[in-house]
Structure formats: C-alpha cells, structure tokens
C-alpha cells in the first residue's frame, strides 16, 4: 500500500510504499526505483519525484499480475456476474473507487483487502478487480458503517439520545474534556509539543506534565485504565500545520500502547484530524472576516 508522506512546501515531493518482504520482490523494486530509500521511522520505502505515485501504482499493478496474472479478468467476470450496486462504489478501468464518509470501520475493512490503496488525489480508496472476492466478502460491513457515518444518520442518533442516560454520559464526557487533562503512566509519558493519538480525545498535543497523582476511582468512567501510578498532563488540540507535518505510524497501536494511553497516529487518524482542523480554520477565517 502506498501513502503520501506529509511534507512542507519546501520539501521535495516523495511517496512511501510498503509490501510483504521477500528477496526477489525487493530486488525488482530496487531495480525499478534505484533512488528509493528505506525509512526506519516510517518502516517503509520512500520514492522521490513528482510522478512517484503514478510509478508506484504501475509497479504495484505489475507485481499483482506477477502473482496472479489472470486475477483481473476473473474479478471482472465475478463483478459482471454478481455486481455490487452501491452509491459508495464506482467502476473504473482497473477496478473500483470507494468513496464514503469517514469511518474507522470502513478504513479497517479496506485495509484487509489485498492491493487496496488510498488515492489522495481523488480522495478515494482504489481496489483492483483481482481483489473483488475480498471486497465482496467485506462489503456488507463497509456499506453498513458508511451509512451510519452519513451526517443525517448521525443527526437521527443524536435526536434519539435526548433525555437518555447516553446523553447524560456524553455531557459528563464533554465536561471532562473541557478540563484539558489526561492521565498517563509516570514512567512512560508522551513527548511534549508533538501530536499523539489518545483513546479518550483523539489526536492532541501534550503541553505539560503537572506531576499531580490521579485518583483512579474519581476518573474511572472516563479513564478506566488509569491507576495510582498515573499523573495528570495538560493538552491542547493540534493545529493543522502540526498535523500536516506529523509522520504517520506504519501500523496501528498494540495492546500496550492503548493501555498506556498514547501512540503515534496512523495515516487515517491524521486524515480525519486534518480534515477537522481544516474545517475549524475555515470557519474561524469566515468569522474573522465578518468582524
């Protein structure tokens, strides 16, 4: 799967790519991309150049054909025999485009499909015909999650929660969020001043560690993993610029990272956070111009 590496305007354009390791595949890759370099931070290969994404896409297609040269045709035949009919799916010459409202479930499902990849230019997921069986197998979960992520469906669920314990719980969560604090293990604190992902409030920037011990009973509802060894840290929302310059983690957080309460964000988490930050900056700009 290839994903764009975050960069500033002054940095040369480059793309990243990762694939299952074997000597022959790496040899073919290095022959095609002699300027590629391995990044330990990203755990992926970086390919420089303004046409890097197109060249990577062509190489991935050739590798797919090498492993299963008749897969594309079989996928086309399978689609024609039993097509997926959905407003979230469009047919292109090489396979399918999938465009949905953001949903972590959708992303998780698509990442399990061989050769599926995010197309940042078109803001869609691309799935080749050769992976149609896998796509069809996961489509029910993908479409259901996409429908639940539609703004109107979100509004309906919000209306249904009014006056319920669920709404009361949401209000308590909002009150806790306004305190701008998070508990972390005193012996494994997140870095200050850099965006990190948290299970409680998404991607945030830690501003300070107060050293004040956490009362786990008091905060059990909002921070169930906190214990007597946790201390409070202050946080703020990450800016769009900070999010753009944050490199994504190659893999999702493990059990330990979730238990300690912070981890390096994945690309999908960053995309959602960047979109939200961009909307906030746009609204702020409109308000400023109105004043």
Image (cartoon, rainbow, N blue to C red):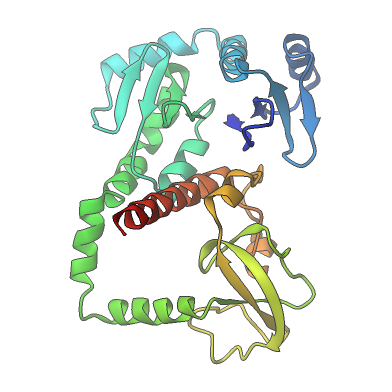
Q: Name the one closer to the observer, 17 or 139.
A: 17
The part of the image, by quadrant, that contains residue 84 is top left
**Which quadrant, please, contains the C terminus?**
bottom left
Task: Check the image and report above or below for 178 versus 18.
Answer: below
**Numbered circles on residues, count:** 0
In the image, 221: left or right of 244?
Answer: left
Query: Residue drawn 26% across and 48% down?
Result: 150
Q: 109 and 175: which one is in front?
A: 175
Q: Nearer the viewer, residue 12 or 80?
A: 12
- Image coordinates for residue 58, horizontal then vertical, percent: 57, 12
The percent coordinates of residue 144 (x first, y second) are: 30, 46
Q: Residue at x 54, y 8 (%)?
A: 69
- Residue 93 in the image: above or below residue 219: above
Q: Residue furthest front?
A: 291
Q: Quadrant of residue 11?
A: top right
User: 10 or 147: which is nearer to us?
Assistant: 10
On the picture, is 72 further left or further right than 7?
left
Q: Where's residue 162, x and y in %?
A: 20, 76
- Report the side of 223 relative to 141 (left or right): right
């Amino acid at each position: 799967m290839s994903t764009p590496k975050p960069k500033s305007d002054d940095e040369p354009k480059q793309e990243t790519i990762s694939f299952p390791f074997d000597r022959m595949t790496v040899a073919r890759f290095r022959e095609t991309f002699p300027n590629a370099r391995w990044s330990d931070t990203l755990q992926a290969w970086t390919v420089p150049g303004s046409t890097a994404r197109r060249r990577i896409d062509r190489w991935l297609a050739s590798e797919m054909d090498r492993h299963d040269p008749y897969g594309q045709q079989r996928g086309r035949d399978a689609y024609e025999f039993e097509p997926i009919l959905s407003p979230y799916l469009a047919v292109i010459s090489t396979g399918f485009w999938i465009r949905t409202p953001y949903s972590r479930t959708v992303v998780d499902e698509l990442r399990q499909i061989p050769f599926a990849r995010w197309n940042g230019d078109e803001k869609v997921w691309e799935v080749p015909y050769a992976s149609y069986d896998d796509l069809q197998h996961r489509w029910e979960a993908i479409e259901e999650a996409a429908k639940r992520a539609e703004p109107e469906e979100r509004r309906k669920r919000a209306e249904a929660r009014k006056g319920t314990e669920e709404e009361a719980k949401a209000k308590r969560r909002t009150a806790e969020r306004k305190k701008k604090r998070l508990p972390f293990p005193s012996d494994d604190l997140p870095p200050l001043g850099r965006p990190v992902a948290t299970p409680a409030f998404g991607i945030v920037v830690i501003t300070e560690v107060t050293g004040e011990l956490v009362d786990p009973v008091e905060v059990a509802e909002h921070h169930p993993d906190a214990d007597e060894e946790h201390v409070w840290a202050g946080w703020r929302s990450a800016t769009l610029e900070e999010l753009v310059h944050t490199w994504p983690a190659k893999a999702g957080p493990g059990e330990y990272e979730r238990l300690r309460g912070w981890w390096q964000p994945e690309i999908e988490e960053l995309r959602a956070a960047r979109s939200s930050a961009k909307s906030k900056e746009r609204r702020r700009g409109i308000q400023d111009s109105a004043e």
